[in-house]
């Protein structure tokens, strides 16, 4: 069981490192600060993407209901 816990801890650490590295590189590419890049991604891009995907799902559901009639 400890091996599973160690592997999970390693995976979480790797994912955290990758996300932080991605945000640092994004802020360097856009010539902004790390905090600004976090604000854009976490407060604007991800919620916008979520709303877009929910909208696509609703449109698909409506069209599927129309086809079944």
Image: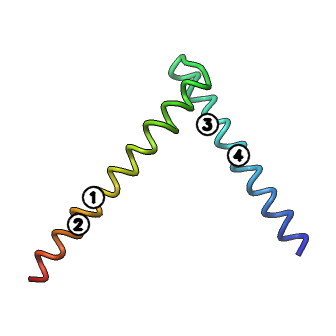
Q: Residues within 10 Å of mark 4 (few under 14, many from 20)?
A: few
Instruction: Determine the secondary structure under disc 2.
Output: helix
Q: What is the distance, in whole Å, between disc 4 and disc 2 at their CAs?
A: 34 Å
Q: Which residue is mark 4?
A: 16
Q: Is residue 10 above or below residue 26?
A: below
> x, y percentage for residue 42?
52, 39
Per the image, label 4 sits on a secondary structure element best described as helix
Task: Name the element at disc 1.
Answer: helix
Rendered image quadrant of residue 7: bottom right
**Which circle, 3 or 2, is nearer the viewer?**
2
Q: Which residue is mark 2?
A: 60
Q: Residue at x 83, y 70 (%)?
A: 4
Residues under numbered marks 4 and 3 in contact, where contact means CB atoms less than 8 Å apart = no
**How far apart in space, not on screen, are marks 4 and 3 (Cα)?**
10 Å
| Mark pair 3, 1: CA separation | 27 Å
Residue 69 appears left or right of 43: left
Report how far apart the C-alphas of labels 3 and 2 lie in the structure: 33 Å
What residue is disc 3 on?
Answer: 22
Spot occupied by residue 24 in the image (x, y as percentages of width and height): 64, 29
In the depicted view, which residue is nearer to us: 29 or 40?
40
At a point 78% along the width and 63% down the height, the residue shown is 8
């Amino acid at each position: 069981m400890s091996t599973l816990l160690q592997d999970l801890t390693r995976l979480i650490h790797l994912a955290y490192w990758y996300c932080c590295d991605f945000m640092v590189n994004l802020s360097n590419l856009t010539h902004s600060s790390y905090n600004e890049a976090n604000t854009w991604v976490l407060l604007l891009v991800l919620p916008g993407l979520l709303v877009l995907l929910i909208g696509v799902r609703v449109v698909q559901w409506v069209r599927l209901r129309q086809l079944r009639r």
